[in-house]
């Protein structure tokens, strides 16, 4: 059946539906006859970061959050390192980072600081879940330039000690993470903090406020 409108022929609705059905059937046939190749890389999630020991877990909406990672490299390999870290930048941004940058320390040859921000603490947690097994090669390529990582991961802690609590400032050598916390003694917060570090295999160097003949550092 054909209907004439303004001098042009139009195919009936039934004919249009029949042609679309034929097209859909052909798509199913092509799905088996010309299959897309399987991806060569694994897109399975690879969340390998340790949980950060904190006095108080931030709320998911807290932020924005700035992350800093320190790299000590051979200055002679600077060009190769920068190529690798800029490849890593694309993964960071894909997973939710913004304001990404790489800085070098003008006082220490071969010292670089990677910094980036995420919108919130919850976004930082989700960023870890977006990292895939396929991204592992890129990360390991960056980490191969690091020098001096044969020793255990070290956290340096400065302590202002009081009978009922202690205020600490910490710095993690491997990641460049730093911050301040107040740990209460009466509710076991301080004990849990140091036990968590031990369970994660983190070597700790504690510098206490000097009193009398006390000396810094104290290693644990």
Image (cartoon, rainbow, N blue to C red):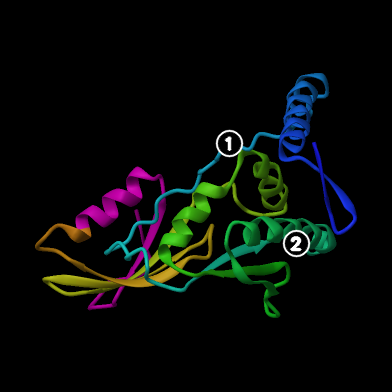
Label 2: few (<14), some or many (≥20) within 10 Å? some
Residue 169 pos. (x, y %): 36, 72
Closer-to-camera residue (97/11): 11
Q: Residue at x 41, y 61 (%)?
A: 122
The magenta span reads 191-220
Q: Is residue 205 left or right of residue 2?
A: left
* Magenta-span inclusion, residue 2: no
- Front: mark 1 or 2: 1
Residue 90 position (above or below residue 137): below
Residue of label 1: 44
User: Residue 178, located in which quarter of the rendered image?
Assistant: bottom left
- Magenta span includes 206: yes
Quadrant location of residue 69? bottom right
Residue name at image x 59 percent, y 56 percent:
95
The tag on residue 2 is none
- Image side of residue 62 versus residue 8, left or right: left
Tell me if 128 is positioned left or right of 24 in this view. left
Marked residue nearer the N-terminal end (1 or 2): 1
Q: Nearer the viewer, residue 219 or 141?
A: 141
Which residue is rendered at x = 55% and y = 49% of the image?
A: 130
Picture quarter with the N terminus: top right
């Amino acid at each position: 059946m054909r209907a004439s409108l303004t001098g042009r022929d139009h195919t009936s609705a039934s004919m249009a539906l029949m042609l679309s059905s034929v097209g859909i059937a052909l798509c199913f046939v092509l799905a088996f006859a010309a299959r897309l190749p399987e991806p060569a890389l694994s897109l399975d999630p690879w969340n390998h970061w340790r949980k950060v020991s904190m006095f108080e877990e931030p709320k998911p909406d807290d932020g924005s959050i700035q992350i800093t990672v320190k790299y000590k490299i051979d200055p002679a390999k600077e060009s190769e390192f920068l190529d690798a870290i800029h490849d890593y930048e694309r993964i960071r941004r894909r997973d939710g980072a913004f304001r990404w940058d790489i800085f070098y320390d003008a006082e220490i040859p071969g010292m670089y600081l990677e910094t980036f921000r995420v919108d919130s603490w919850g976004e930082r947690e989700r960023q870890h879940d977006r990292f895939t097994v396929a991204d592992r090669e890129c990360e390991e390529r960056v980490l191969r330039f690091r020098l001096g990582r044969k020793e255990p991961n070290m956290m340096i802690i400065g302590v202002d000690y009081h009978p009922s609590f202690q205020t600490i400032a910490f710095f993690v050598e491997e990641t460049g993470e730093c911050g301040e916390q107040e740990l209460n003694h009466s509710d076991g917060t301080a004990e849990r903090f140091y036990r968590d570090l031990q369970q994660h295999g983190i070597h700790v160097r504690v510098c206490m406020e000097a009193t009398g003949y006390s000396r810094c550092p104290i290693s644990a």
